[in-house]
Amino acid sequence: MKAVVTGATGLVGGHVCRALREAGHEARAVVRTARISGPLDRLDVETVRATLDNPASLVAAMRGCDVVIHCAAVYAYGVARAAEVERVNVDGTRQVVTAAAEAGVRRVVVTSSSVTAGSSGGPVARDESGRIGTEYVPPYFISKVRQEEVAFATGAESGVQVVVACPTVVLGGPANRLVPSNAIIVRYLTDPTRSTFAGGCNVVGVEDVARGHVLLAEHGKPGERYLLGGENVSWRTLHSLIADLAGVGGPYAEVPASVALATSALAEKWAQLMSIEPLSTRDEALTIGRYFWYSAAKAAQVGYAFGPARAAIASALAWILIGEHLPRWVRDGLRVGDEVRAARRLMPRPL
């Protein structure tokens, strides 16, 4: 099988390229610039330049391939990027499926998000039948719902088989930027109060998610959504695992949603002043108290499997430690053990 991967320089897209090669498939990585780094660094894949707003470049990139794995997206919270999120995640997906049809590719795997299955008020795991209810929904969540609708509708119109992958909170590295999922770890380590809060999420390692995409390209049923998740944990359990692996204290107090909202507002203001991405946003804070717990039973039917949350956190922490996202004073206070050091995949270097 020869697959073309959009968003190949991103966290998930880059690892999908690696997973394709490890499974014995050919991979063509779609990139926007000539600079290759992160997950694609020193990986034996063909690269081709194309952008979502240039349909001709997409068609050219897809010709001769059997399947498109569409990982390109904007994963961001906050009102300031809402229009960009809608344009890339929704309009970009329409362009990709349309381009696949023109290029003669009859199968597209679209990377969406588990948030499209909704959340619960208590610790209940949801499946693919779930939908967003009356709870607060950030613009990013809405864009992923619309992305799925557009992908299926465009596929039906153009004769392209569409399968949707719905990853949960994806942790790991390497990555070219600090995505909101890995920022959860940075946020806890830079919090001097070592606070936690109510609710929970489902966390999964990026390598498991990447292998899940390959399985869906091979065996996924057209017109279906598949949750690619891992272990369901409360926020207290997640923060406890981070604390243990990093050798720091906590979590201590459980802060109410109102405090988290105020803190996030300050973080957004500081990020705006410094022209950087905020570590937390009001969009995220407004989801506190909900349980984003999911079941991967359906994906397991095509061979999907996942590791424990502890392993996913250790892997992400190993990459965060060698990056630029932790201040020196935080890094110097960590006491990580061999478990974290061993979690980072060794990357080959040319002789």
Image (tube, rainbow, N blue to C red):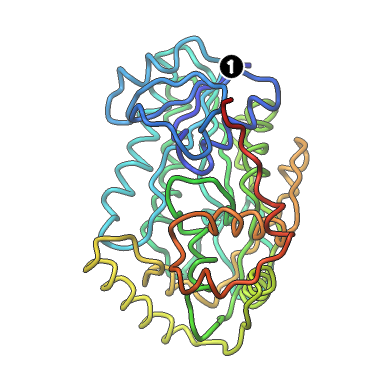
What is the total number of numbered labels drawn onto the structure image?
1
Q: Is residue 183 above or below residue 347?
A: below
Q: Is residue 231 above or below residue 28?
A: below
The x, y position of residue 341, in whole percent, is: 68, 56
- Give the residue number, with chain letter if any, for mark 1: 2
Q: Quadrant of residue 107?
A: top right
Q: Secondary structure at mark 1?
A: strand
Q: Residue at x 63, y 52 (%)?
A: 129
Q: Is residue 253 above or below residue 149?
A: below
Q: Quadrant of residue 141?
A: bottom left
Q: Residue at x 51, y 58 (%)?
A: 181
Q: Quadrant of residue 345?
A: top right
Q: Quarter holding the C terminus? A: top right
Specify the farthest residue to the front: 351
For the residue pair 183 and 350, the one nearer the viewer reads as 350
Q: Is residue 205 left or right of residue 94?
A: right
The x, y position of residue 89, in whole percent, is: 38, 43
Give the crowd class for mark 1: few <14, some 14-19, many >=20 residues within 10 Å: some
Q: Is residue 135 left or right of residue 204?
A: left
Query: Which amino acid type is marked by label 1?
Result: Lys
Q: Residue at x 41, y 38 (%)?
A: 150
Specify the farthest residue to the top: 64
The x, y position of residue 122, in whole percent, is: 64, 75
Specify the farthest residue to the left: 273
Q: Quarter holding the N terminus? A: top right
Q: Residue at x 43, y 57 (%)?
A: 324
For the residue pair 90 and 239, the one nearer the viewer reads as 239
Q: Is residue 237 above or below residue 53?
A: below
The x, y position of residue 56, in whole percent, is: 30, 17
For the residue pair 32 and 203, the one nearer the viewer reads as 32
